[in-house]
Amino acid sequence: MATIKLREMQVNQAGVIVSVKGTGELGRRIRDMGLVPGKQIKVQGKAPLLDPVCLRIMGFTLTLRNNEADYILVEVN
């Protein structure tokens, strides 16, 4: 299985978070939203200009800007 940045995932593509590279306040904020290694995610959609990205994690919908999604590495199914 390939490991890619969350930003590079396609709509309806699922995967498992491998790591969160963000540090400091941004890294803490990302992890506080539940984006931690081992969690299953699925990209539900992207805005017309591809920013932000909408995803499902732990039964809820979350949107992230691409600059935040770049810090999250995902192993795609």
Image (tube, rainbow, N blue to C red):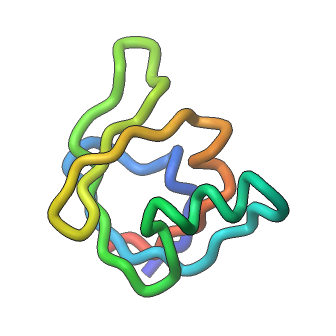
Q: Position of residue 69 (x, y in %)?
A: 57, 48
Q: Position of residue 60 (x, y in %)?
A: 20, 56
- Using the rendered view, name the quadrant where residue 23 is placed: bottom right
**Total marks placed:** 0
Residue at the right extreme?
Answer: 24
Image quadrant for the N terminus? bottom left
Image quadrant for the C terminus? bottom left
Viewed as shown, does residue 22 lie left or right of 7?
Answer: right
- Using the rendered view, name the quadrant where residue 31 is placed: bottom right
The correct choice, above or below, for 24 with respect to 49 in the image is below
- Using the rendered view, name the quadrant where residue 76 is placed: bottom left
The correct choice, above or below, for 67 with respect to 49 in the image is below
Question: Residue sitting at 23 percent across and 70 percent down?
Answer: 58
Between residue 7 and residue 24, name the one nearer to us. 24
Residue at the bottom extreme?
Answer: 38
Between residue 42 and residue 24, name the one nearer to us. 24
